[in-house]
Image (spheres, grey):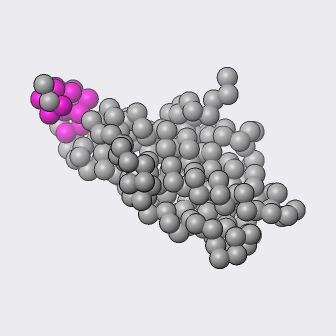
Amino acid sequence: MSDSKIPVVGINVLKQNGLDVEELKKLLIQNASVEFTAYYYFTNLRAHCTGLEGEGLKGIIEDARLEDLSHFEACIERIYQLGGSLPNDATQFIKMSGCEFLQLPANPTDHKAILEKCLKAEQGAIVNWDKVCKMTFGKDPTTYDIAKDILAEEIEHESWFLELIYGRPSGHMRRKYSGERPHTRKHSRALDMA
């Protein structure tokens, strides 16, 4: 029996609620690609934060980096529940993210340029997850719950980088530990140490 013939009540209910499930799957796969690729690029950018000033920046980038990995993992199960899947080709998956702008700046240890790249990534993620929230609100509480929690962390990340670049107070409190992910922990177990 093909997947289209299998009665999936969880998908049928969403369609009855007026949700375009195919469009949602595309958005979730795209957002998963962005989160995964941002994790990779933040790893590289963090490594180039050198010197005394760089040591402080590494901690902030590390928190955002690990939470982006959690965001990737948080939406994987939902993609498959909706009948979607990740591309088999990892290079195709990374290319669909559009995150080439996160490559190292011309001066690879230019802290301000690194922070500006991180900020741009977080602002893009806010737009991406806001689309999912708007699409699923009142129609798909499961996906909405995941998206709103990711959005909350992306907004926090944006405020951290705005503070570092422009001196705009963020109310930022350091995470208790890297990978704490206060909003998305319930959606992703990948970073759990115990």
In the displayed structure image, the side of residue 47 where residue 129 appears, left or right? left
- Where is the C terminus found, in terms of image quarters? top right
Q: Position of residue 142 (x, y in %)?
A: 38, 35
- Residue at (67% x, 66% y) in the render: 115
Q: Is residue 171 visible?
A: no
Q: Position of residue 88 (x, y in %)?
A: 36, 43
Q: Is residue 10 above or below residue 75?
A: above
Kindly indicate the quadrant of the structure image that contains residue 85: top left
Q: Is residue 146 visible?
A: yes
Let me know if residue 35 is in the magenta part.
Answer: no
- Where is the N terminus found, in terms of image quarters? top left
Residue at the bottom extreme of this rendering? 106
Instruction: State the residue in front, 75 or 169.
Output: 75
In the displayed structure image, the side of residue 190 where residue 33 appears, left or right? left
Q: Position of residue 126 (x, y in %)?
A: 49, 58
- Residue at (51% x, 44% y) in the render: 71
Instruction: State the residue in front, 36 or 61.
Output: 36
- Residue at (85% x, 64% y) in the render: 51
Q: Position of residue 122 (x, y in %)?
A: 55, 60
Magenta span: 3-15
Kindly indicate the quadrant of the structure image that contains residue 92: bottom left
In the displayed structure image, the side of residue 163 where residue 97 appears, left or right? left
